[in-house]
Amino acid sequence: MTFTKSLLLVIISAVFFNCSSKTLGGLTKEEYKSWKQQKKEMSIEAFKALVEERAKLVQENATLTEKSAHLEQKITSKEGEIDRLARQVMDLSTQRNQASNGNLESITDEWQSGVVFKVQLAAFDELDLRDLTENGSDLKIIDEEGYIKYVLGQFRDYKMADQFKKKLRRIGVKEAWIVPYKDGKRVALKEVLSEAID
């Protein structure tokens, strides 16, 4: 007996248990008698196996539906990331064209040299807020050491960076801390603190 026939028998058996001879569920009298005879010929073990198989299939269907919804959500997220990266590529291409035409004054940013203090807000391994930086925001996102790090503000003066960090903590950004950069690369605070305070 094929699986489809078995499943069909389970469903029909359930219908027959709940139907009287007056409500045949759309079956002709001949069909009703035929299915009733097949039900009688089915052993309890076979019926039990059909019911258990149906329950297993219902559970598998629910699991697959949940996985499908999760994958759809991931696909939507990745499509958004692709769109963001495509816009970023277009922007970089435009900047490169402008630079090659002599319209760009200088690619080197004044903040890339010397000691710079930035306030890092957080470091997440899953949460991605990159779309917040698309319109020239001072919020910078850095992929580093398996984390997506969010940095806000640039200060030449350590005390100003510290004041900004404290304000962020007062408004609820509890994990804000100062991270120094020297010549565009992150360095240990103790390496530059004496130089910055002098």
Image: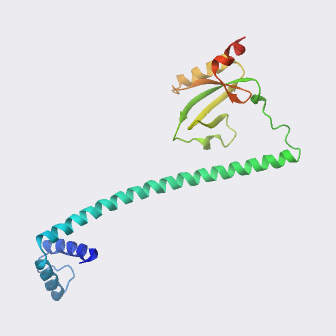
188 shown above or below 99: above
Q: Position of residue 28 (x, y in %)?
A: 19, 87
Of residues 59 and 169, which is closer to you in this image? 59
Q: Position of residue 41 (x, y in %)?
A: 11, 79
Q: Quadrant of residue 186?
A: top right
Of residues 194 and 156, which is closer to you in this image? 194
Q: Position of residue 55 (x, y in %)?
A: 24, 62
Colour pattern of the rendering: rainbow
36 shown above or below 193: below
Q: Quadrant of residue 7?
A: bottom left
Q: Residue at x 11, y 70 (%)?
A: 44
Pick out the residue farthest to the top. 198
Say left or right for 144 vs 156.
Answer: left
Of residues 178 and 20, which is closer to you in this image? 178
Say left or right for 4 vs 156.
Answer: left
Counting the numbered discs, the total is 0
Pick out the residue farthest to the bottom. 30
Q: Is the N terminus in the top left, top right, bottom left or bottom right quadrant? A: bottom left
Q: Position of residue 66 (x, y in %)?
A: 38, 56
Q: Is the C terminus in the top left, top right, bottom left or bottom right quadrant? A: top right
Q: Residue at x 72, y 30 (%)?
A: 184
Q: Residue at x 33, y 59 (%)?
A: 62
Say left or right for 88 vs 74.
Answer: right
